[in-house]
Amino acid sequence: MAEQQKLEGYLRSQGAKLSAEQVRDRIQEASDEFLGVVQGAPEALVRKAPAAGEWSLAEVLDHVVFTLERITGVIGGLVAGRKPPAPLEIGATSGIATLPWPELLARLSRSQAALSALLTANHHEPHVDLRVPEGDFGELNWKEYALILRLHYKDHAGQARKTLEAFGPAGSKK
């Protein structure tokens, strides 16, 4: 509970302090970090889980893309002044983990570019007073929702590193 309150405070303070462009840049930096970890992964390992019950890199990437696309949709509605019809629920994965690895990486890049374009187009920051409930962090505006993605990328970059490390030398980049 204390960690959740700390993260909620971070989202609120950073959302109030940072411009839309700064939010975009912070998310892009975290996206680049995540992509830097996964894009060099040996393709022979991307569908292997490091242990029973753990996600493969393809499943991690699937989850990251799915979350990015869902949150981008919520942000798009909020900047247009529309609340989503129901609270956003993020599932584990969307089922795209079976796509060829280069396609998964390309989809992440396209989805991240779409979010960046959305944040750039809304540099004048419309409707930041419009808040919607988020299951873990209370009522958020679109900038705070966007910052969830920064945390999400960083968390899964760490997960991807650990996954690759679990494979030992086979998981190291060439």
Image: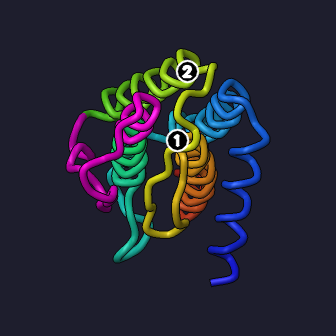
> In the figure, 76 relative to 163: above or below?
above
Where does the C terminus fall, quadrant-wise? top right
Q: Residues within 10 Å of mark 2 (few under 14, many from 20)?
A: some
Quarter of the view holding residue 68: top left
Asked if the residues shown at circle 1 and circle 2 are in contact, with their CB atoms under 8 angstroms apart, the answer is yes
Towards the viewer: 120 or 110: 120
Q: Main secondary structure of the magenta part?
A: loop
Number of callouts:
2
Most extreme residue toward the bottom, as rendered? 1
Judging from the image, what secondary structure is the residue with disc 2 in? loop
Quarter of the view holding residue 82: top left
> In the figure, 33 relative to 9: above or below?
above
Which residue corresponds to mark 1? 142
Towards the viewer: 56 or 83: 83
Q: Is residue 20 magenta?
A: no
Which residue sits at x=37%, y=52%? 63
Coloring basis for residues: rainbow
* x and y percentages locating residue 23 in the rendered image: 67, 34
Which residue corresponds to mark 2? 122
* x and y percentages locating residue 52 in the rendered image: 35, 76
Amino acid carrying label 1: it is: Trp
> In the figure, 9 relative to 69: above or below?
below
Q: Which residues are magenta?
A: 73-99
Which residue sits at x=41%, y=53%? 60
Q: Is residue 90 magenta?
A: yes
* x and y percentages locating residue 95 in the rendered image: 20, 49
Most extreme residue toward the right, as rendered? 17
Quarter of the view holding residue 20: top right
Which residue sits at x=32%, y=59%? 87
Amino acid carrying label 2: it is: Asn
Judging from the image, what secondary structure is the residue with disc 1 in? helix
**Mark sitting on residue 61:** none
